[in-house]
Amino acid sequence: MRRFRGSPWLGPLSERAFFLLFTGRSISLLGSTVAPIALAFAVIDLTGSPSDLGLVLAASFLPQIAFLAVGGVWADRIPRHIVMVAADLVGGAAQAAIAVLLLLGQAEIWHVVVVAIVRGISAAFFMPAASGIVPQTVRSEHLQQANALLGLTRNSTALGGAAFGGLLVAGVGPGWALAVDAATYGLGACFLAFLRLPAVPAVRRRFTQELVEGWREVRSRTWLWVVVLQFTLINAFSWAAFFVLGPFVAERSLGGPAAWGLVLTAEAAGMLVGGFVALRRRPRRPLLVGNLGILLIAAPLGALALGWHVAPIAVAAFVAGVGVEFFEVNWATTLQQEIATEKLSRVSSYDWLGSFALVPLGTILVGPLAASIGLSGTLWVATGVVVTACLATLAVGEVRRLPARPGTEPVESDRIPAALAA
């Protein structure tokens, strides 16, 4: 790993622990981009029912909400890489089981639902551990770059993995595609198992006490709970409006699935660019500048509401992707700097929980709302929620003024312009 030491961008990869984490996550993420496509076509082959596909998605999503706080406590109690390895092995075993059933022609829809539930629970344990482990694998001066590199691999696998998954499903079928996903879980877990991390000091209390302690950490920091509340609202409205109503707009006026695929590809490309920007630039006021990036989510929603052609909508989605990923990296780095390591997974679990909490409700309500006020009207409501939530968040002094910690700021020439960071 000596070869990475000359590059400030790739510096985290010179540290053995982060290299193992990065490699394991990258392998696992590649398989995870295949899974949604394979599961969707598995359901189509089994029943051909959109309602059944919705049931499978809900079966994966709802257990994450139910178990995230529990996963955060356990990730603060025992070594986080052990939690991640266990979660990967459980998720991989579930995928292997449904792959075998599909290949043998024995699968039924309830099998797919059960597997989705198991994978949702395993993800609820994996995610807080993955958020909390990064500061244990790199020196503080590499923390921003480490989060950016993890974001880059997440977005690059999303950009290329979907195409790979489509070709795999078309070529060998959903069963073999899910078998590939199961294998990537196992291989990723092997890299994580070799991690040797410093022990995190912790005082063992009752489970409920540790759960409450994590909530107190969130509640005691205004900047933290305000941003979590902001994303509770933004995700509930913008995610549902964009991903549920967007395809209908594409079908009616943009040219169908190919046009919508172009919009999603542009968004993923923007997130890649946002990751590269975050790799180089650490603003003096990370939440201030990051929230200006989140404000850009309003652009594609507004473009869809205005009925623009596919090209300007794709440009708006690209711009939004840049802003979202730049915020994500700065948010992760801020949490890791401001929260004590022994409490970080619990705080991260409440962050994830707040972000997800109202998404199922949003997906349920967006259809009836669109039937009542129209697609354009509903998209304007979502746009207004994004703008209002961002402006309200930026009105909070702690959000605007929270500084980047020393040791993670880039050199002067790499900083965000002072006009934005003031």
Image: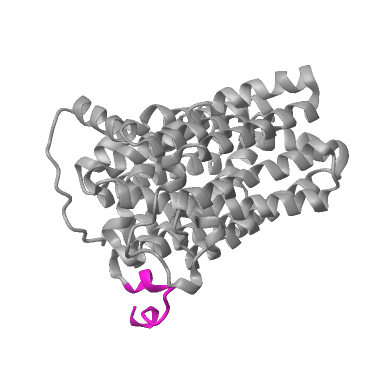
Q: Is residue 76 visible?
A: yes
Locate residue 137 relative to residue 243 in the image: left or right.
left
Query: Where is residue 105 drawn, in percent x and y?
Result: 57, 38
Query: Where is residue 19 drawn, in percent x and y?
Result: 35, 67
Count the marks: 0
Locate residue 275 relative to residue 379 in the image: left or right.
left
Q: Is residue 154 visible?
A: no
- Magenta region includes residue 88: no
**Residue numbers of the magenta segment:** 1-14
Task: From the viewer's side, name the closer residue of 206 and 88.
Answer: 206
For the point 44% across and 58% down, the residue is 284
Query: Where is residue 172 drawn, in percent x and y?
Result: 62, 53
For the point 70% across and 28% down, the residue is 381
Task: From the viewer's side, name the closer residue of 62 and 371.
Answer: 371
Coloring scheme of the render?
one colour
Q: Does 308 sit above or below residue 184? A: above
